[in-house]
Image (cartoon, rainbow, N blue to C red):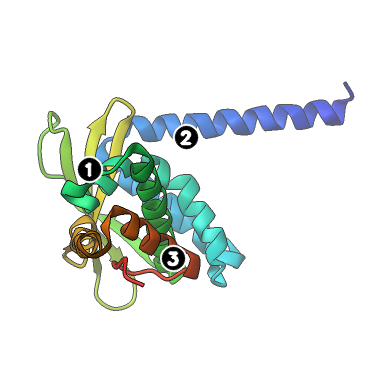
Amino acid sequence: MNHPLLQRFMSVIAAGLLALASFTALAQDGPDQLIRRLSADVLDTIKTDKEMQAGNVRKIVALVDGKVMPHVNFTRMTASAVGRAWRQATPEQQKRLQDEFKTLLVRTYAGALSQVKDQSIAVKPLRGSAADTEVIVRTEVIGRGDPIQLDYRLEKTADGWRIYDLNVLGVWLVETYRSQFAQEITARGIDGLITALAERNKTGSGGASAKS
């Protein structure tokens, strides 16, 4: 094995170990530390990437999918948004709902991040005790104009803290989608909701509505 190839091989190994160490550190973080670290990592990446600054949403989607989504409990989030109908759905329907809902959330979140210029995140002091298994981490997006409220509901799991809901300007995301999804399910059933979400994702439109 020649030296350049060996050096390249070792570089790949080192990069993999660094990524694993970073993920392990995130998994061991407290809930407020996790949100602070994720927020800083995402914002710093966007601010230093010229393509993202120019509004390359596809690249921002990849960033969100790679850095944020591993720390989200999508099964709980989707089940909560679908409501009582979740228990009536087949395993295949549940999987399709979760996949489509994830795509919708990633694109919606990425669309918001595409507007990031010089904002920063302020994480407020965490309320509660060390024994809590569910907490709310409250933050503010600081930039031009008034601060924007952005809060996170997290649960403690065997793999670390996981996000299962977001609050933007006083509106919890899951509650908003639950109302919209309930209307769609009443009108068209579970398969109708899946179809509506798939159609919305194909057009790339966001918003807290499954209606086309």
Image coords of residue 143 (percent x, y): 34, 71
Determine the CA span between mark 2 and mark 1: 39 Å
Determine the CA span between mark 3 and mark 1: 23 Å
Figure check: 58 above or below 131: below
Figure check: 167 above or below 53: above
Q: Are marks 2 and 1 in contact (CB under 8 Å)?
A: no
From the viewer's side, name the closer residue of 138 and 143.
Answer: 138
Image coords of residue 26 (percent x, y): 38, 35
Which callout, 2 or 3, points at the residue further toward the start of the chain?
Answer: 2
Residue labelled with disc 1? 88
The amino acid type of the residue labelled 2 equals: Ser
Q: Which mark is residue 199?
A: 3
Determine the CA span between mark 2 and mark 3: 36 Å
Q: Nearer the viewer, mark 2 or mark 3?
A: 3
Q: Is residue 72 visible?
A: no
Would residue 6 appear left or right of 72 to someone viewing this image?
Answer: right
Q: Which mark is residue 22?
A: 2
Would residue 118 appear left or right of 145 to someone viewing this image?
Answer: right
Image coords of residue 181 (percent x, y): 24, 60
The amino acid type of the residue labelled 3 equals: Glu
Residue farthest front in this picture: 188
